Image: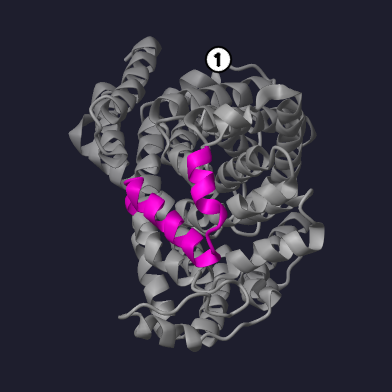
Amino acid sequence: MSDMAILINTAVAVLATVVLIVRFKVNPVISLIIGSVYLGLSAGLGVTKTVETITGGFGEIMVEVGLLIAFGVLMGSILNETGAIRRLVEHLLHVFGPKRLPYTMGLAIGTALQSIFLDVLLVISAPLARKLAPRIGKLGTARMATAMAIALECGIVFMVPGVAALALAGLLSVPLGKMMIFGLILIVPTIIISIAIMTFLFRRGFWNEEKDEDHIYLEEDDDTSAPGTETIAAGTETGAGSGSTGSGTGTTGTTGRSNGDGATAEPVPAGASVAVAEADKEREAPLLVLFAPLLVSLLLIGAGAILEILKIEMAWLQLLGEPVIALLIGLIGTGIMGRYTVGQKRVETAIATGFKESGQILILTGVGGSLAATVGAAGLGDILGGFFSASTVAPLLVVWGIAALLHIAVGSVTLSAITAAGLLAPIAPALGIDPVLIALAAGAGSLFMVHVTSNTFWLLQSLLGQSVRGALKSVTVGVSVASVVAILLIMPMSLLF
């Protein structure tokens, strides 16, 4: 088959996948499999080889990241149940003050909290951000909404153990420790620069409080206590229609039963005695202790990566630094702390919720691997390899552009990043470019134009009291700025590494 025919069939397969998702509302997993089958058959692989490639690609990426994703989501679900997120935000406010809160909260969400499933993290932190926004002063809602949008989306694609970052690392065979180090180097300046740019635009008139904020929603919420805030958030989340967010509603509610100082604000309604009894059993552990297992696991992964780079033999640390072992240690430690603070039953509930959330992520990641394997088997890698020069900048811009176009059409950050990276994964070695840079470029492109096709857009719009017009500014423009900032930072990195 000619090179042009393979290129055309690949384009048709990707376009058909997008059309099935956007126009006919077919589940992304099914759409990706259909696209992979078409590409395999049209490229002349035959029925048997096509099926073997699809199933093999699914299995290979599950070997790489399956347990990592599951462990990370379970750890985040338990942290959610213990109320660690709420306490962290309150601590950041106390230490850094309200004016620096958008930056400190953004960095915390984008880095340390990425083990928590995105929608659950959003619905936990958004009510707190909304309550704290007036304390920042003028443009508080705009700044907090933008900081949260940028941090949430950047974290999921750049920072281990964000689910898209794990998937990209597995797809491109990037050592997880290396992905974590490079992701951290990229995400910190990206978040800070992007929030600073958006703050500058807001102060120059880009934000109109009368038109960009939902004043009816905000007025209703102004005098609401912390428990009521959590109730509003949970109700909005359910209304969003997302299965993953809906599964997190129950655990969200369990973190907001008090006013923050342990005192009961109102009489307990009839039928709530069981919940109160459970709340009375809670013990408060120091915040650092709650996050210690997660931090230890990330430090172990980083240590293992450093040993590998320096080629130092240290068997026991190499074992503990293996990502699966490190995250397992973190999960066990988080579970122990959860049992101590909220009890065994609530830990079991959190784990059950985590399993529900991780299932869809694992399947989507796996079929992304299937498409990448089919692209490689069809010979597209050799064809694309001849189109690029020795320069490493052009491939990074191409993968960024592909991911951006896919995200505009599909509305899924993870799906667009995986698909774009998969198209260039087969030729990464031939390009002489480090695969970690391709992973980061795909992640950066997938952030471009988060808009009305994204469930995250609507959650940020409703939970932070914005009008749709306001969300288009804080979310769509804000995260797009982060996408451009990230690729502008990645290209110089490609000249250094």
- Which x, y percent locates residue 238? 34, 52
Which segment is the magenta one? Answer: 215-244
- Which x, y percent locates residue 402? 50, 24
- In this view, the residue farthest toward the left is 47
**In which quadrant of the rendered image does the N terminus lie?**
top left
| Magenta-drawn stretch contains 235 | yes
Horizontal arrangement in the rendering, residue 353 relative to residue 115 (left or right): left
**In which quadrant of the rendered image does the C terminus lie?**
top right
Q: Which residue is mark 1?
A: 387
- Which x, y percent locates residue 448? 55, 28
- Which x, y percent locates residue 211? 56, 27
**Which residue is at the front of the view, 247 or 419?**
247
The count of marks equals: 1
Mark 1 burial class by Cα count in 10 Å: few <14, some 14-19, many 20+: few
Residue at (50, 69) in percent of width and height? 256
Look at the image and tell me whether residue 163 can be seen.
no
Residue 392 position (above or below residue 466): above
Residue at (42, 88) in percent of width and height? 277
Residue 482 position (above or below residue 269): above
Secondary structure of the magenta portion, mostly? Answer: helix
Name which residue type carries label 1: Phe
Residue at (74, 52) in percent of width and height? 104
Residue 359 position (above or below residue 451): below
Horizontal arrangement in the rendering, residue 478 relative to residue 466 (left or right): right
Residue 289 position (above or below residue 136): below
Q: Quadrant of residue 410?
A: top left
**Which residue is at the front of the view, 41 or 105?**
105
**Which residue is at the front of the view, 402 or 348?**
348
Q: Secondary structure at mark 1?
A: loop
**Which residue is at the front of the view, 442 or 377?**
442
| Magenta-drawn stretch contains 201 | no
